[in-house]
Amino acid sequence: MGEKSQVQTVWSESELSDLAIRAFQGLGLPEVDATDVVKVLVLADLFGLSTHGLSRVESYGERLLVKGINARPNITVQAPAPALRLVDGDNGVGPLVGMHALRAAMDAARQCGIGMAFARGSNHFGPISPYSLIAAEEGFASVIGSNATTTIAPWGGSDARLGNSPLGFGVPNPGGSPFLLDMAMSVVARAKIRNAFKRGGAIPDTWATDAQGRATTDPKAALDGFLQPVGGHKGYGLALLVDLFAGLLSNAAYLTHVKSWVDAPDEPQNLGHFFILIDTRMLGSAQWLSERMMDFAAILHDSPAVDPERPVMVPGEIELKKMAQQRTNGIVLDETTVSLLMQHASA
Amino acid sequence: MGEKSQVQTVWSESELSDLAIRAFQGLGLPEVDATDVVKVLVLADLFGLSTHGLSRVESYGERLLVKGINARPNITVQAPAPALRLVDGDNGVGPLVGMHALRAAMDAARQCGIGMAFARGSNHFGPISPYSLIAAEEGFASVIGSNATTTIAPWGGSDARLGNSPLGFGVPNPGGSPFLLDMAMSVVARAKIRNAFKRGGAIPDTWATDAQGRATTDPKAALDGFLQPVGGHKGYGLALLVDLFAGLLSNAAYLTHVKSWVDAPDEPQNLGHFFILIDTRMLGSAQWLSERMMDFAAILHDSPAVDPERPVMVPGEIELKKMAQQRTNGIVLDETTVSLLMQHASA
């Protein structure tokens, strides 16, 4: 509104994807691999998850440049059983390893009805909902998880020994919107505590502990301490389960064996992921599934809202609506990310 | 300690199982089916989960007597794909349907590395940890869930439209204790709110809402309202996911289609369950898995406890310790349950 109002570029999905693919090629990736990475990150931006979208070119790029991530990995897939796949990411960019594992699990599920891929030798793989959407669009329900750098104390403990591991789910709806749930295990993201600290307010004592592992309402103490898992011991248990599947069973690193990419950007993290895919076409017709999914959503939407301005939602609706809007109106990306993409693209 | 101190019978596991099997036979079940049901319920009592153990003979018995549950179901298993099983419980006792589905999923996982059973036409199937333990003892990691009668409002809604659906996980440890996590989606059980009401105290505003769906610290208002899911919208999403897998994809009832066994004890509930089993023997040797599971637990145990009296635990440790104690010292069951078992056993 000011005299010097900044002109923000509005991107179409394909223009932005083209630029980002060239950027990752500039960072050393073959075009086909860059395309996989960008598929996940652009979907994240379309969903409005900008912290997990193309802005990651910054941290991925830094690690690619110091060889902390392998730009040209030799990703291998083994099949120890008809429905299982073991993916070794060879320290490739996370979303590339993720896309290989997703395709391997879908392939197994097409053959057996359900399939599972365990990935090791990976890195941060973006948010989960892009993978869940790709799976849902091909008819697969999904359970997907990844482990992460340690930021959470065990329940009752007092130092960081587990990650804020994300866990996500999808259920397809051939006649409408799929169900998409993508959650980390902390009550809130660290950014919410930082905001409270800046405002000078107190935080609920369920959000975080101080450095000694004691519940706190002081945002400063919380920032020096640890995020609390949702539901206390329940979220602690869930975060462990994700690490057991994504890290321990996948033969990747787990708990404190996961290296911090901030502290050691030039060392492989050996993160792990798991992808469980269920081929819903084996369970009933598309019409059967659509009718049930539409009825399921209608039952929830029909619950009278506590606040009439905020009707009841089904998980995934916010992200899918944002995607539809941006596909119509274009995507606005922050200028830092755009210049970084341009810089790498012209390298 | 008083003059008339009651003599409580201490049962061995086999004595108690024998009595309970005869009780369920008295309620009309064939011996082999009664044995399945009792296997799950006695494990629940051994774990210290008495609300989900043999005390359930009361509600199961009432419904069997009014034909709300079928004492002699024709349970069928279909295999629409190599790793999928569709189990129709024909309105049998829940733990019987659960054991059929568990075995079907283990069978599929032995063949394909991962297997999944969807069960419909079922009833309350006990707690999840007994199934997870049975699976873990045979080398399977598990993800198991069930839907339930509606007691929770959708996030932002104001009437009960989803159940406090339990979700459980297990990971075997060939050299020690398996990981066992069995959680419902509410922050606390209703009993904790009832206790606060009896004591006359306030409750944290994260436990429940009043009948209008607004957060409350008044236990009376909370008892008239709805349990809150763990992590707010996160627990809401997880509870929905469990219902989508256990109810919607299994072709059972879901959300408000699930009938309340309290309001309509003589009608089939058509509850659904799902069992995802992973054969960990396909992933590595028993020694490989043991070493990793021992290391995993050691890392957690080594976190200095906030309260030195309460060391850090790994999910499942409390239940497995209780089981070991009771297998050594015998099981003490409440007298109401014992007399009910005896009554049905002599029918």
Image (cartoon, coloured by chain):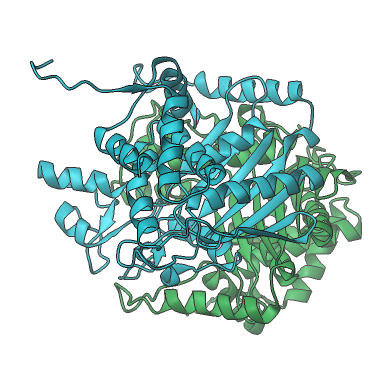
Chain colours: A green, B cyan
| Residue B301 picture location, percent across and down | 50, 20
Q: Residue at the spot x=88%, y=50% of the render?
A: A28
Q: Residue at the spot x=34%, y=78% of the render?
A: A309
Q: Residue furthest bottom?
A: A328
Q: Nearer the viewer, residue B260 or B68?
A: B68
Q: Residue at the spot x=68%, y=22% of the render?
A: B290
Q: Nearer the viewer, residue B108 or B222?
A: B108
| Residue A26 picture location, percent across and down | 86, 55
| Residue A58 picture location, percent across and down | 70, 51
Q: Nearer the viewer, residue B197 or A2?
A: B197
Q: Nearer the viewer, residue B301 or A43?
A: B301
Q: Is residue A331 above or below residue A20?
A: below
Task: Write down the quadrant of residue B148 in the picture.
Answer: bottom left
| Residue A280 picture location, percent across and down | 70, 67
Task: Write down the quadrant of residue B259 in the picture.
Answer: bottom left
Locate the C terminus of chain A and report the quarter of the image it occupies: bottom right
Q: State how many labels appear.
A: 0
Q: Residue at the spot x=68%, y=49% of the render?
A: B105
Q: Is residue A280 above or below residue B274?
A: below
